[in-house]
Structures are given as C-alpha cells and as structure tokens.
Image (tube, rainbow, N blue to C red):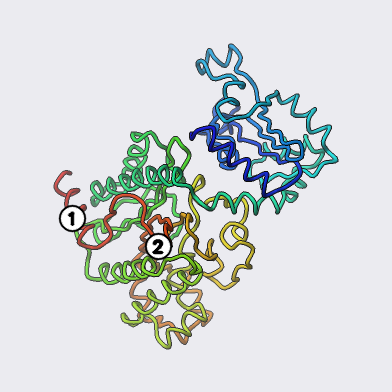
Amino acid sequence: MFTKETYIERRKKLMETMESGIILIPGNGDASMDYLANTYHFIQDSTFRYYFGLDRADMFGVIDIDNNKEYLFGYDYTITDIVWRGPQPTLREEADSIGIKNIGSFEDLKKFIGGKLDSDIHFHPQYRGKNMIILGELLGKTPKEIESGHSEKLSYAVANQRNYKSAEEIIEIEKAVNITRAMHLKAMQTAKPEMKEYEIVAELQKTAIENHSVVSFPIICTINGQTLHNNYYGNTLKSGRMLLTDCGAKTSSGYCGDMTSTFPVDEKFTPKQAEIYNILIDAYDHAESILKVGITYKDVHLATCKKIAEGLKGLGLIVGDIEEVIKNGAHALFMPHGLGHMMGLDIHDMENYGEVIVGYNGEAKSTQFGLASLRMGRTLENGFVFTVEPGIYFIPQLIKKWKDEGINKEFLNFEKIEEYLDFGGVRHEGDYVIEDGKPRRLGMKMPKTIEEIETERAKAYKNN
C-alpha cells in the first residue's frame, strides 16, 4: 500500500477526467469454493485497489464528482469476526489511511444510491457475479443489465490512467518480476527425467509463497508446450522432451510478474531443439531491439513474426515470399497468439475492460487467425509496462486441419513440418517498461540463451 496521498491524487485525476456524475467502484468479496465458509484465496478487485488501496473484502468506494465527495462503505468487524480472524482496523481507520472523510455501512450505501438514481452513474465492467448482483440491487437492474451497462467513458478514463505506471508502481512490479525469476530458476535447477510436472509446480508455488507472494495466475508447466494454456500437471518428464514453464508472482502489494522459459528435460539441448530455440530467441531479441516510444505494438508483433518465419524458412518449413507469408497469416500456424499484453495489478492488466479499450485505445482489432489474439496493438508510450512473449509451436491437430483444408498451402512445406509433430512448443517471455523513450527489461538478468540455460540445468544434475 502506498501513502494516502497517492490514492488521493489518483481519485482527483479520475474526477477531473470524468468531469461529472457518480462513480461506483465495488471491491471484491470472498468467493466460496465448495461451501460458504471455505473460500478461495482473496484477491481484491484491481480498480478498487488502485483508487482505494485496501486489501479487505466487502468494501465499496463511491466518488461523487458533482459534490466533490468521496465515500467508503463497508463494515466493522464483529467480536465473532475477531475471534476467528483477530483484531482488524476499523472502517474509520481504513478510510483515514487513504484520505477518505465519509464512511458508512452497506445500508447507508443503499440509501445514498436510492437518492441518486436520477444522477449520471458510472461503473466499470464487472466479472464477478456477486458484484453484478450488488450493483443490480443498488441500481434496480438485472445482473444481465449490469453486465452490459458499464460506462465506456469510465472504462477509457481508468484504462488511460492505469496504463501509465508511476515510479513507485515500477518498484513494486519489479519486486514481483524478481520473484517470478526465482520461480523459473528453481524449475531449471530442479527438473530431471522421470519427475512429474506437479513436482516442479510444487517448487514454483513454494518459491512464490516463501517470498510472501501468491501465483499471479494458474501455473503452466508442461512437456506439451504446444498447448498454449496447459494447466495439467500429471505428465512424466521424459528425456528428449522440453519443459515449458509460464508463471508469475503476485506480491502483497497486488502487483504481478509474468515470465515464460523453455528448457530441455535433459541437461543440454539436442541439435533439433537448439535450432528451433535459437530462432525463437533471435525473434525475441529483434522485438526488444525495436521497442520504443511511437512504434505500435502491432508492428512489433508483425516484425517478430517475420523473424520467426525467416528462421523457419531457413529450415525448409516455410516457403515463398516472407512478406506474403506474413500478409496471409501463414506464420500463425507456428505462433497463433499475440506478442504480449499490458501488466500491472492484473496479469493481463484490466482485461475485464476489454482489449480494444486497454490494448488498442479504441482501434478495431484484426480478425485474422493469430493476429486476432494480439491483446495489445497500440502505440507505445513512456510508462507502459507489458510483456514480450514470442513462441514457436507444432500443434498436430492444427497442422492436420491446415493440411487437409489446404490453408496457406503455397507457403507451408507440410512434409517437412510433419517431422516436428512430436516437438511440442517453445516460448520465452520477459516484462518491460518504456522509460525515456526506450525499453528496459524489468528485474535481474534472466537466463535466455542456450548457454545460460544449460548452465542452470547443470545445477539440477549436480544437486539432485
């Protein structure tokens, strides 16, 4: 949590942007797993946390712009709560810590909103059913109306404020990135043939927890790297395969890290693995080299895809003119996702606001396969924090579909491609900030090259 002045200034800026009306910002409540009292780990709504700073369940923030008043609605803990959870700050103390003068209960909130229903009321897109129900009860709307009735003006105002990270936010993000790095190093220094994927996942989670963090999203740790979001951990690590790990830490401050590494289950890369991996890293380095203020991230994505296509053409997997390959999206057989996304208090920052608002600033997205999955295409600016995440995948089902249907057949050597059907996939991801017009990779140096990764892998074989 930052100083109360930070939250006062954030709310002030939002009021100046919105100019008039009432802004409703509900925090999250506890979410039950299988019965009411057995809840998931609590994660605060990031917009509430950004403007009100509190990591406490069942809070509700209101900003009345026309009357220049801010409110925090919630409850004080009862003696029963204290018996089970220990002493907690009062609602008054919480409000004072973030510069809020006006407080009240949820009954007070209902009375307040009941007297303001003829006002211009704004709320941001909601993703939890409970908050949709609460807003619906307050505003006399159905959850479906709440789901579709959020304020686009507020969404743009919040996104265009939160997208620019302050110096104090960068410090917190970098802490999360360094813990994320430690998680990846642990995997590299632990994995060996005949281990189970879940044994590596356990080490990743342990590393996050022992650094006073939680994982920022469900861990991806798999020998089947060709499945982009693979959350199954039951496979056995086998010699000759590669292990793709995509994970991140979310610190107690709420900020996230997100990185991906791929390394051989064996101590060293095979020649075939090294060929594909080096193409990946060449593309990654190229992406990093062209990041700057003024370039669109869509152009960075396409330039990275071109670099991958050139490398695969060198191996005989792609044929024909590379410009035509990219124009027709033939490269997406190997990289069917986008290059990266915004990152901050959410791992995909503000994704509930919609990619067009956050990642494109209103520009329409492409519908072409692969490019349609690019979450961020807007012009880069100072203060943006985002990921760079190229990948190369051999997805047997996708390859078969394209071959059977003749999709981009003039650019693809399917006979050669089928030699890689059991390869899996590789991906490398780092987290960046644009400062003074230039990119900086956040966190301490991460093993990236074959030589650096094999140095870490040697530790697994020495220590285990």
- Please give left or right for residue 77 compared with residue 232 in the image: right
* Secondary element at tag 1: helix
For marks 1 and 2, give the CA distance. Answer: 30 Å
Rendered image quadrant of residue 207: top left
Pointer 1: what residue? 455
The kind of residue on which mark 1 rests is Thr
Sequence-first disc among 1 and 2:
2
Q: Nearer the viewer, residue 302 or 436?
A: 436
* Figure check: 229 above or below 173: below
* Figure check: 419 above or below 458: below
Pointer 2: what residue? 438
Q: Residue at x 43, y 74 (%)?
A: 303
- Please give left or right for residue 424 compared with residue 56 in the image: left
**Image position, residue 300 (x, y; %):** 45, 70
The kind of residue on which mark 2 rests is Lys
Q: Residue at x 48, y 72 (%)?
A: 299
Q: Nearer the viewer, mark 1 or mark 2?
A: 2
Q: Nearer the viewer, residue 18 or 323?
A: 18
Q: Residue at x 45, y 59 (%)?
A: 228
Please tell me how crowded label 1 is: few (under 14), some (14-19), or many (20+) other residues with Cα within 10 Å. some
Residue 327's disc number: none
Report the quarter where the C terminus lies: top left
* Figure check: 405 above or below 458: below
Please report contact status of discs 1 and 2: CB closer than 8 Å, yes or no: no
* Secondary element at tag 2: strand
**Image position, residue 49 (x, y; %):** 56, 38
- Please give left or right for residue 442 compared with residue 9 in the image: left
Please tell me how crowded label 2 is: few (under 14), some (14-19), or many (20+) other residues with Cα within 10 Å. some
Q: Nearer the viewer, residue 3 or 314?
A: 3
Q: Residue at x 34, y 77 (%)?
A: 311
